């Protein structure tokens, strides 16, 4: 007997808010057969440590695929009825798209078109980054704008949206 | 038939959280005759683009008045029974007051005295900016303090307060 | 007749969100005999002003003890059945621990072990700092991580958790 997972879930939260652990719990209670779609790239020590610590916490029972840029194609290829996918996280995907100078509207539009066609449930994790002072840096402002637009888009397609702070979820939709 | 609008509403949210669109929706459902009180000044390209995009989204049915500093007087002059006013946004008003070296206590006190006397409903939009790391810059810290104090003041006078993230409102009061 | 205070409460919020005033209200309604455990140190003018303004607002009826680093010991020594303690705030404690190059796991673990053994109720106030852009500065990133981990830990031990914005509390637990 497993808990039901909505077709599309968005888990938003701040840095070290417990959002990944909360999202993993949703997926683990729903199925023993699950896929972790990682958008993070281990480009420095700090990031390597963080990825290793996430992998350690997840433990057994997860297949892991790295997909720093081609997230939409990975979702299309990997979705199976009854196998949940956890995407962690959208903000790193936005970073990778920006670093690769991809067109954001095309990328976001492609993801939005694909989501309703997926065969299995998907949980997106993302960092809320828009609640501090306006950054001095134009690149950081652009990032914040892209992330905010993507969150609105995914939230509009999601059946459930949770905001996590201090490890505690607050349901905003669903 | 129109939805009712409370006398005073505050809509708080982060950058690109969908707070303006949410606030516009509240006002549009309440009345066909409405005023947009803009505190933004188009001092650079980025700001000009943002103002143009907001104006485009609002579409027809809005009168727009720019009031970067004299917000309280504009509210007094423009308020009419049954015509809602949308003020977008308080944080830009704080920025403009600081740039003009106005006394913040006087400005905030004047607004707070005026609000209960207005003849028509008013919706304030503002950016929550206090949930990141303490800024290095003393001016940014002062801005964050002024904005936080103003939000507390307006929230205490408001009948409804909404916090918007990813386009989704969370009612905090009302 | 006094309101009941849970054994352990966490009040989270942004800068100038009204979190301290909210927490003080909880404690003041619960008991006339109360202790303020301050972690702040007046190392510059800005901080001195802030401490003085907090002290002024609290008014009479509070005993104040400063405990910038030895928070756990102060809690052990000061806890009395029926006398609530307000700790304001955890983020300054994290700052002081980092400045003193203390081991964070040891400090956090010690606090977590002590909390369930305390004889009287305790209310922790802390700043949510993880909802802005990732800071450039490695020290600020480490601070954000420590604060986030500590919030998760205290929230897991707390009976009540409130998130405060614009002076308005949102109950996240309890």
Image (tube, coloured by chain):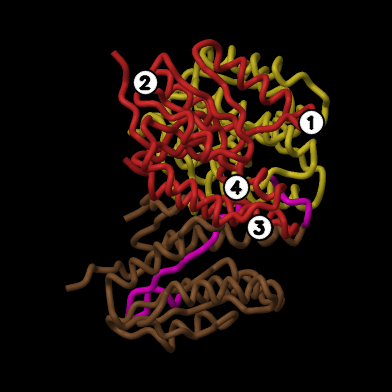
Chain colours: A brown, B yellow, C red
Query: Which mark sits nearer the N-terminus, 1 or 2?
Result: 2
Callout 2: SS: helix
Pinpoint residue C61: horizontal percent, then vertical percent.
Answer: 49, 12
Q: Which residue is mark 3?
A: C142
Q: Which of the 4 image quarters holds residue B136?
A: top right
Q: Are marks 3 and 1 in contact (CB under 8 Å)?
A: no
Rounded to the nearest angstrom, the CA distance separating label 2 from label 4 is 29 Å
Q: Which mark is residue C129?
A: 4
Callout 3: SS: helix
Circle 3 packing at 10 Å, graded few (<14), some (14-19), many (20+), is few
Q: Which residue is mark 1?
A: C44
Rounded to the nearest angstrom, the CA distance separating label 2 from label 3 is 36 Å
Do marks 1 and 2 share a chain? yes
Q: Residue at x 67, y 17 (%)?
A: B73
Query: Which mark sits nearer the N-terminus, 3 or 1?
Result: 1
Callout 1: SS: loop
């Amino acid at each position: 007997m497993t808990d039901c997972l909505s077709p599309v879930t968005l888990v938003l939260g701040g840095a070290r808010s417990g959002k990944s652990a909360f999202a993993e719990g949703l997926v683990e209670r729903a199925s023993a057969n699950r896929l972790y779609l990682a958008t993070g790239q281990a480009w420095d020590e700090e990031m390597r440590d963080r990825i290793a610590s996430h992998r350690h916490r997840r433990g057994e029972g997860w297949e892991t695929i790295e997909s720093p840029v081609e997230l939409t194609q990975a979702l299309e290829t990997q979705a199976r009825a009854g196998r949940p996918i956890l995407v962690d996280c959208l903000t790193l995907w936005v970073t990778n798209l920006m670093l690769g100078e991809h067109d954001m509207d095309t990328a976001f539009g492609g993801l939005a078109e694909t989501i309703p066609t997926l065969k299995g449930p998907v949980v997106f994790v993302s960092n809320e980054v828009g609640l501090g002072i306006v950054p001095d840096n134009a690149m950081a402002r652009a990032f914040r704008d892209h992330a905010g637009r993507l969150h609105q888009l995914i939230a509009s397609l999601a059946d459930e949206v949770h905001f996590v702070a201090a490890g505690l979820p607050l349901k905003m939709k669903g």
